[in-house]
């Protein structure tokens, strides 16, 4: 009887199979990794929505008359008050919820940042962790709960020299002591060597001399600010500025004595008062049609050579031509655009 033998793989064939498997692994690894990464990111976003819903429910059930509520997460654990949520807690996070159910969230999951401002409809996921920089500690601020006004800024946390120093780079919190921060008070941050400033989307008014005589070089104004008071940012070092359309009034000397070379005025601003931008380095300017009033010396002592003025009436030139010198536009070339 003839015996049958099964032929095995030769060494060459085995090596060929191994090479093919390695090639397939190299080709599929990015695809599999991408699927896993996308799944992880979706999990972070879903957890952020879980935090939002949980915070809203907690505030509805436990508002206790507060105008807002703040929740803090550190090392994946709630610090202080907590609530039930679906999903996974972030490594670090702050969730603010207001009485009218507006929610702001900053959450860090590993190397990802999830954030949402009060007026945003959806959360945003980004690898830019600068978007999730946590606000300056509440203990650095003197705060009037009855008016939602920051009235001062301490050199040390809780105004105690034995505590950590309060930073010169300030990211203002939108909630302090479960009350919305709506006003930055008169002289609250004056003469404190502040270098950078982020204003949250809860603030509606920046009062007189609030940040005067600092060394601010970077500033971010939220689109909730409506009034910038007299000399509010006088004597800083701001090189560029975008004024949100929410700002109706830029008061006298508000930005006098800075280093502004690039100024963007968004539609919405109505009045620019005396000397508002005196003594800067502005070389060109666009005036939106929303602006009704520009007072004397508003732009004096700049380097303005080109101006575009938008308006919706044929009398636009007559409104400004007789006041060019008084406003501080000197020999600038002016183009009028009738909308």
Image (cartoon, rainbow, N blue to C red):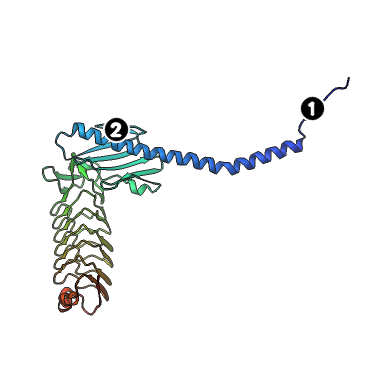
Q: Residue at x 76, y 35 (%)?
A: 11
Q: Which residue corresponds to mark 1?
A: 6
Q: Is residue 145 left or right of residue 103?
A: left
Q: Position of residue 233 (x, y in %)?
A: 19, 60
Question: In the picture shown, does residue 190 fall above or below 283?
Answer: above
The C terminus - image quarter: bottom left
Q: Is residue 84 left or right of residue 23?
A: left
User: Which sits earlier in the primary sequence, circle 2 or circle 1?
Assistant: 1
Q: CA distance from mark 2 to mark 1?
A: 65 Å
Which is in the foreground here, disc 2 or disc 1? 1
Q: Which residue corresponds to mark 2?
A: 78
The N terminus - image quarter: top right
Q: Residue at x 77, y 34 (%)?
A: 10
In this orientation, does residue 91 appear?
A: no
Label 1 neighbour load within 10 Å: few <14, some 14-19, many 20+: few
In this orientation, does residue 18 appear?
A: yes
297 or 6, which lies in front? 6
Q: Which residue, as the protein is rendered here, is positioned at the far bottom?
A: 331
Question: In the picture shown, does residue 224 fall above or below 70?
Answer: below
């Amino acid at each position: 009887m003839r015996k049958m033998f099964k032929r095995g793989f030769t060494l060459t064939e085995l090596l060929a199979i191994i090479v093919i498997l390695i090639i397939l692994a190299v080709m599929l690894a990015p695809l599999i990794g991408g699927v896993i990464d996308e799944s992880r990111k979706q999990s972070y976003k879903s957890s952020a929505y879980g935090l939002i819903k949980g915070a809203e429910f907690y505030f509805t059930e436990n508002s206790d008359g507060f105008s807002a509520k703040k929740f803090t997460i550190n090392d994946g654990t709630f610090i202080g008050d907590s609530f039930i949520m679906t999903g996974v807690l972030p490594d670090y996070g702050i969730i603010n919820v207001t009485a009218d159910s507006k929610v702001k969230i900053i959450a860090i999951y590993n190397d990802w940042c999830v954030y949402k401002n009060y007026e945003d409809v959806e959360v945003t996921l980004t690898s830019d962790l600068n978007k999730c920089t946590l606000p300056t500690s509440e203990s650095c601020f003197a705060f009037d709960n009855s008016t939602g006004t920051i009235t001062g800024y301490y050199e040390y946390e809780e105004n105690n020299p034995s505590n950590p120093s309060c930073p010169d780079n300030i990211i203002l919190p939108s909630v302090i002591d479960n009350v919305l921060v709506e006003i930055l008070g008169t002289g609250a941050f004056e003469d404190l060597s502040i270098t950078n400033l982020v204003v949250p989307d809860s603030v509606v008014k920046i009062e007189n001399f609030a940040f005067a005589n600092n060394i601010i070089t970077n500033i971010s104004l939220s689109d909730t600010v409506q009034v910038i008071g007299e000399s509010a940012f006088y004597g800083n070092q701001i090189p560029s500025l975008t004024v949100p359309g929410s700002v109706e009034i830029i008061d006298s000397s508000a930005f006098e004595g800075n280093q502004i070379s690039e100024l963007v005025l968004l539609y919405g601003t109505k009045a620019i008062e005396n000397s508002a931008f005196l003594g800067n380095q502005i070389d060109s300017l666009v005036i939106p049609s929303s602006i009704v009033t520009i007072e004397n010396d508003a732009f004096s002592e700049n380097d303005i050579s080109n101006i575009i003025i938008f308006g919706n009436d044929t009398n636009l030139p007559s409104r400004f031509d007789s006041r060019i010198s008084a406003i501080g536009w000197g020999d600038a070339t002016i183009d009028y655009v009738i909308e």
